[in-house]
Image (cartoon, grey):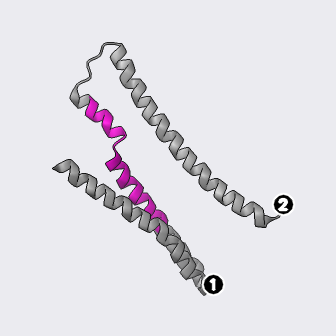
Amino acid sequence: MSEDIIVPIAFFGSIAGIVWLVSHYNFKKRLTLHETVRHAVDKGQDLTGEAMEKLALITDPVRADLRRGVLFMAVGIAFGFLGLMVGMEEGEAVKPMIGVASFPVFIGLAYLGLWAAGRREQRG
């Protein structure tokens, strides 16, 4: 196989692998939480509202939106910085890299917007 085929397969395969890993570990985290609650109930322990709220924070989508938003923003800024650094050597690389950087930046902004909206809903 030539590198014209291997590189795109590796690139898109790595994206699929990353998505699978994130989904798998999120599933495992939720499964562990449910097993913990089930085990506590089976042993006859009383689960107070405060304990349930603390357990719910583990899978809180509002906190997850903030984390994802910050992460995507960081990735976008890193791509933009990479484009500027490569652009010092080859001036034609700046615009395409800024274009690539815009995707995670806008996704990060969307997650930060979801986080802000979720905080407003939780407050009142």
Range of the magenta residues? 52-76
Residue linked to disc 1: 90
Residue linked to disc 2: 1
Closer to us: 66 or 27: 27
Please state if 118 lies on the left or on the right of 84 as rendered. left
The residue type indicated by label 2 comes to: Met
Graded by Cα atoms within 10 Å as few (under 14), some (14 to 19) or many (20 or more), the crowding at tag 2 reads few
Residue 45 appears at what percent x and percent y? 29, 16
The residue type indicated by label 1 comes to: Glu
Please state if 8 lies on the left or on the right of 2 as rendered. left
Examine the image and state in which quarter residue 60 appears. top left
Closer to us: 5 or 77: 5
Examine the image and state in which quarter residue 14 appears. bottom right
Which residue ends up furthest to the right in the rendered image? 1
| x 27%, y 58%: residue | 116
Q: Dot 1 lies on which element? A: loop
Which residue ends up furthest to the bottom in the rendered image? 91
Closer to us: 85 or 110: 110
Q: Dot 2 lies on which element? A: loop
Q: Is residue 10 above or below residue 28?
A: below
Examine the image and state in which quarter residue 7 appears. bottom right
Q: In which quadrant will I find the N terminus?
A: bottom right
| x 26%, y 18%: residue | 46
Q: Is residue 93 above or below residue 113?
A: below
- Pointer 2 or 1: first along the chain: 2
